[in-house]
Image (cartoon, rainbow, N blue to C red):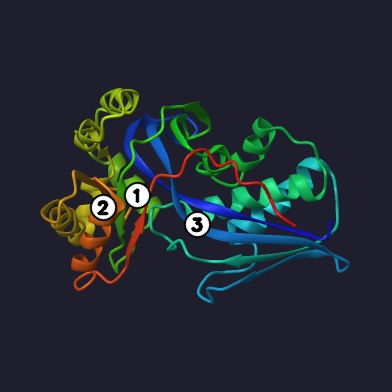
Amino acid sequence: MSGLCMQAFAKINLCLDILGIRPDGYHEVRMIMQQLSLFDTVSIRKTDEPGIRLFCSDPALPTDSRNLMVQAAERVYEHCGIQGGLRMELQKNIPAAAGLAGGSADAAAVIVLMNRLYELGLSGEEMQKIGLRVGADVPYCIYGGTALSSGIGEKLTPLPPCPSCGILLVKPEKGASTREIYSAWDALSDPFRPDVDAGIEALRKGDLGLLAKSLGNSLEPVTRARIPVIGEIREAMLSCGAEGAVMSGSGPTVFGLFPDIISAEKAGETLKEQFPDCFVSCAEPVNRAQPSS
């Protein structure tokens, strides 16, 4: 088996609630995660030359140990006690530093692909444990679909799929530092708390309208204070027919839920004049994509 490739899907947080800070310094969270059809493509193959090499279509991204893909490969080698040379290629489509877990999805793909390429026989849970050493979103990106994420992101429970809809993503030009956003949240005396249970109930009923009303993100007020255009994007989406809109992750990307893909595309055409980084997507069911040679 010379090489394998697979799609690495982006995610959004339909609900993101922070419960507090743990003794180890991590934040305890409760989130509804949703995989999107927007994806990067990750390819790997063994090489005769030792070491890990990464080649990326986006020259702005690091290709050394700062990249989560490289870290993921290193963790697999360490965990399984194996050695070898590995060439990785990344075709980047998910915007970076956007709150869409693009880097985590790419790292998750590396773990899944290496499990197959080296015939390691790792279970899903074992791969998720390796992924957690790389980043809190990596276990979910291995898991996929619609899920309740708790703990620091490693405890995953399947949820009913998101109702059929179109999803418009808009990324502001200015970025946000995840570390700074969480630190700012730590200083709040009365943070916003979304109703995650209402979101779960909406999924169980398959009701897009109820789901749209339950969208919420504890971090949005903090990020919006630093990037006010987030609020403008949200209002613009609602004016263009979104049933609900909210920021994903620590930001700055805002997504809106629309009745269908066509309405999301029309809204995207309107908003693109003011906000160039628009992406139309839809909810992706459980990631059952198999690596291909």
Mark 1 surroundings: few (<14), some (14-19) or many (≥20) residues within 10 A: many
Query: Could you tell me the amino acid type at mark 3?
Result: Phe
Question: Could you tell me which secondary element the residue under label 2 belongs to?
Answer: helix
- Above or below — where is 220 with respect to 159? below
Q: Nearer the viewer, residue 25 or 129?
A: 129
> How dense is the environment of label 3, judged by Cα within 10 Å: few (below 14), some, or many (20 and up)?
many
Residue in the picture at 48% in, 35% down: 153
| Residue 223, label in figure | 2
Residues at circles 1 and 2 in contact by the CB criterion of under 8 Å = yes
Q: Nearer the viewer, mark 1 or mark 3?
A: 3
Amino acid on which disc 1 is placed: Ser
The residue wearing badge 3 is: 39
Where is residue 34? Give x, y as percent. Answer: 41, 40
Q: How many numbered marks does the figure carry? A: 3
Give the residue type at disc 2. Thr
Say whether marks 3 and 2 touch (CB < 8 Å): no
**Residue 250 image label:** 1
Q: Position of residue 189 (x, y in %)?
A: 20, 35
Q: Residue at x 43, y 27 (%)?
A: 159
Q: Residue 251: give x, y in percent of width and height.
A: 33, 53
- Residues at marks 1 and 2, CA–CA distance in whole angstroms: 7 Å
Residue 292: where, in percent of width, then height? 70, 54
Q: Quadrant of residue 2?
A: bottom right
Q: Is residue 137 above or below residue 21?
A: below
The residue positioned farthest toward the right in the image shown: 48
The quarter of the image holding the N terminus is bottom right
**Res 122 → quadrant:** top right
- N-term mark: 1 or 3: 3
Classify the position of the C terminus by image quarter: bottom right
Are there few (<14), some (14-19), or many (20+) residues within 10 Å of tag 2?
Answer: many
First in residue order: circle 1 vs circle 2: 2
Q: CA distance from mark 1 to mark 3?
A: 19 Å
